[in-house]
Amino acid sequence: MNNASTTQALFIHSAELDQYRYPPDCPFKTERAGMTRDMLISMGLLGDGEQRAPIRASRGALERFHAPRYLDVLAAAERGDLTSEGLFMGLGTPETPVFIGMTDYAALACGATLTAVDAVASGAARAAFNPSGGYHHAFPEKASGFCYVNDVALACLKLADAGKRVLFVDIDVHHCDGVQAAFYDRRDVMTLSFHESGEVLFPGTGFVGDVGEGEGKGYAVNVPFPPGVYDEAWLRAFRTVAPPLAGAFDPDVVVLEVGMDCLSGDPLAHLALTNNAYADAAAEVLRWGKPVVATGGGGYHPRNTARGWALVWTVLAGRDVRDDMTGLGGVMMETADWHGGLRDRVLAPDEATRLQVDRALDATLEAVKAKVFGIHGL
């Protein structure tokens, strides 16, 4: 996966992706990816040679994970024929609305992640980032949680089909239910999800005891967080669990979902991170020395999400300068007025929150280690 012309990182995007929009009242905003690109270019952090346009995913590529009848129903719904079967498949809800351009956008956004896979697998880049990806809630025959086509499951399948051991690390605030289900009985793809607890947040899954089954036992790992988790606690959990398991599993490639909905003030979740935690997690992943396919995901404050993704890009591209990239505003000030750089100011919890979060997190980490570490000789 390496050659003499390898680029450190590629940013996968095109103007065509910017043309598609979910309905105006839907909290999922596709324009976040274009905002990220524009921000990076305006700051001199993204060169022409680091950008690659996506190739739309073909019907055959989508059928590697999705049932043909589901794809037919999806296309029919967009044409105005939303049947009872389509409703049963999750279409037509506030979280998975039917809209013009729905199937084209899904195929192009998925194709962008598969383009990132090809770039990494060919050795063209050590890391490739598709901020328009990360649709981890879609199932083979069901749309869910703003997701119609599961690009990350397809990326993992494509890499596994090529004989690669794949570690999927998901740091979106929501559990990766669609991806976990796809590989729950397999050990060539490990799913490792850090998310707000399903006891309080959609999709209501991803508990510590969900560790895989059969050949896959121990290869599904979940670290659910209580509300109010702050940077230091979140990073402590990430560093306790992710590096040891990555070392034991020894993947050929890491697929990393970087949903920005863990940020403080996100309207659909209850965590209290700054974007510094995301940057530090991405840096940790790079230290494992494996090629990385990164995607976006959730994030429902568009400006904060775009700035967080821009920051993650600088880490993937080897350009993060902590001292020079800290500004005033962002999640700490609960404003999108940004006057300095990409990193947020540190956001410290009050003592009562710290004690409550730490107590719950300690119990979770001990349970995770008890459930899965022994399986991997840790």
Image (cartoon, rainbow, N blue to C red):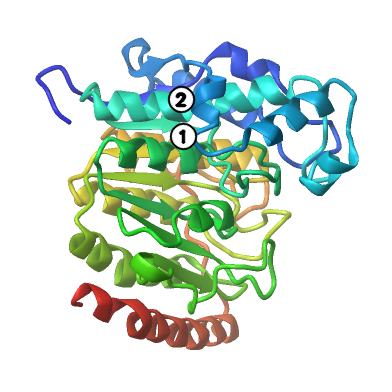
Compute the Cα span from label 2 to label 1. Answer: 6 Å
Badge 2, how many Cα within 10 Å: few under 14, some, many 20+? many
Task: Give 227 or 127, whichever is nearer the viewer.
Answer: 127
Mark 1: secondary structure: helix
Mark 2: secondary structure: helix
Indicate the position of residue 304 as horizontal and vertical percent values: 60, 42
Residue at image coords 47%, 83%: 358
Instruction: Say whether residue 244 is visible.
Output: yes
Task: Give 16 or 64, whichever is nearer the viewer.
Answer: 64
Task: Give 188 or 176, whichever is nearer the viewer.
Answer: 188
Instruction: Say whether residue 93 is visible.
Output: no
Number of marks: 2
Quarter containing the C terminus: bottom left
Kind of residue indicated by mark 1: Ala
Indicate the position of residue 264 as horizontal and vertical percent values: 61, 58
CB contact under 8 Å: marks 2 and 1: yes
Vertical comparison of 170 with 371: above or below: above
Indicate the position of residue 89 as horizontal and vertical percent values: 76, 45
Badge 1, how many Cα within 10 Å: few under 14, some, many 20+? many
**Mark linked to residue 339:** none
Provide the residue designation for mark 2. Answer: 40
Kind of residue indicated by mark 2: Leu
Residue at image coords 75%, 24%: 75
Q: Earlier in the sequence, mark 2 or mark 1?
A: 2
Indicate the position of residue 355 as horizontal and vertical percent values: 52, 87
Provide the residue designation for mark 1. Answer: 310
Residue at image coords 82%, 39%: 86
Task: Give 112 or 196, whichever is nearer the viewer.
Answer: 112
